[in-house]
Image (cartoon, rainbow, N blue to C red):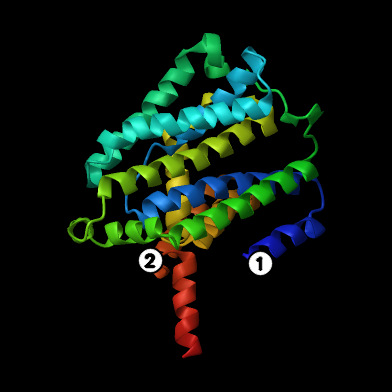
């Protein structure tokens, strides 16, 4: 935690312009989602291919309440987060009874439904053209400038990691790890698998919703392109790439997979070829994810 906080505090020293701040803010927002999604995938062992839907509910919830109905931005953010939690709880109870590819298909369907609703309800959401979002404001002062946004996102990322680490070390976190190991064995010793899986699902949805709301207010404009199946796959890839069941792995995965495409733009038409090759090579040589594999190698070297 200290290393993460120090790195986030010192990063602005190497930023040359606002573009670097913009990329760092995007990394932080994706990392918040990945930390929450890692609780579900890495620790609870449940797959979700529809998390972009929860991102979209948070983003459009804040946008609609603040832009269409004049709500204060913080109240709109809180209301959209509560709505996302209620939606995740309502659909989580039946969906999480499924396993394997059935669960993956069910969560995929949820994300597709949210994406279609956002794209078609143009009177509220602006449809495919998107809609404008007012800047985030509190107590009459609007948050503006990349430096202020970076400070806010960095603080929330540290808070998210701290909450995730404490949750993992709590009785609930130990129950999630037991479920990941063997759901039958966990239930045999008295763990309520349904309750713990739903709680992990709701928490991961809340992380995505908050990040979605902040993304909408930061960019000032939101379109349905951020609520697609492809975005859900990107989020899952960040967790797997960095290392499942590793909170800091989720942060590293989000940082690399968000920042790497920006670096590869110099390759022009070969950008996606090199990006795909990097993903393949990482999964071949680091099958448990980047951070857990490197940590295991460091322990072997130390011995």
Secondary structure, mark 2, is loop
Comparing 173 with 256, the one in front is 173
Q: How far apart are marks 2 and 1 (CA)?
A: 28 Å
Residue under numbered circle 2: 287
Residue 270 seen by the camera: no
Residue 76 % position (x, y)? 61, 25
Quarter of the figure with the N terminus: bottom right
Mark 2 in CB contact with mark 1 (< 8 angstroms)? no
Height in image: 66 above or below 81? Answer: above
Image location of residue 52, percent across then percent down: 46, 35
Q: Which of marks 2 and 1 is nearer the N terminus?
A: 1
**297 horizontally vs 68: left or right:** left
Q: Where is residue 54 in the image (x, y as percent from the top left)?
A: 46, 33
Between 19 and 146, the one lying in front of the other is: 146
Under circle 1, the secondary element is: helix
Q: In this view, does 54 lie to the left or right of 254?
A: left
At 26% across and 55% down in the image, what residue appears?
Answer: 191
Label disc, if present, on residue 261 of the rendered structure: none
Q: Which of marks 2 and 1 is in front?
A: 1
Name the residue tied to disc 1. Answer: 2
Kindly identify the residue that appears in the image at 39 percent across and 34 percent down: 88
Q: Residues within 10 Å of mark 2 (few under 14, many from 20)?
A: some
Instruction: Determine whether, in the image, residue 32 is placed left or right of residue 106.
Output: right
Q: Position of residue 246 (x, y in %)?
A: 46, 62
Residue at the far bottom: name it.
303
């Amino acid at each position: 935690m200290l290393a993460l906080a120090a790195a986030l505090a010192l990063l602005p020293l190497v930023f040359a312009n606002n573009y670097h701040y913009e990329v760092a803010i995007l990394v932080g927002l994706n990392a918040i989602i990945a930390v929450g999604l890692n609780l579900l995938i890495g620790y609870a062992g449940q797959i979700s291919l529809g998390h972009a839907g929860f991102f979209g509910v948070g983003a459009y919830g804040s946008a609609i309440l603040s832009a269409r109905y004049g709500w204060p931005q913080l109240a709109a953010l809180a209301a959209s987060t509560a709505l996302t939690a209620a939606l995740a709880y309502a659909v989580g109870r039946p969906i999480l009874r499924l396993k394997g590819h059935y669960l993956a298909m069910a969560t995929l369907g949820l994300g597709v439904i949210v994406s279609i609703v956002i794209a078609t309800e143009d009177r509220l959401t602006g449809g495919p053209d998107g809609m404008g979002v007012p800047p985030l404001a509190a107590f009459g002062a609007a948050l503006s400038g990349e430096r202020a946004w970076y400070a806010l996102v960095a603080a929330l990322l540290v808070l998210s990691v701290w909450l995730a680490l404490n949750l993992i070390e709590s009785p609930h976190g130990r129950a999630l790890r037991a479920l990941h190991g063997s759901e039958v064995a966990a239930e045999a010793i008295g763990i309520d698998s349904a309750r713990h899986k739903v709680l992990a699902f709701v928490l991961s949805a809340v992380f995505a919703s908050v990040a979605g709301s902040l993304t909408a207010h930061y960019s000032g404009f939101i379109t349905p392109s951020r609520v697609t199946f492809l975005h859900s796959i990107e989020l899952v890839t960040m967790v797997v790439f960095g290392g499942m069941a590793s909170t800091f792995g989720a942060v590293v995965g989000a940082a690399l997979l968000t920042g790497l495409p920006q670096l590869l733009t110099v390759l022009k038409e070969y950008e996606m070829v090199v990006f795909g090759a990097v993903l393949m090579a990482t999964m071949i040589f680091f099958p448990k994810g980047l951070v857990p594999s490197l940590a295991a190698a460091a322990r072997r070297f130390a011995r």
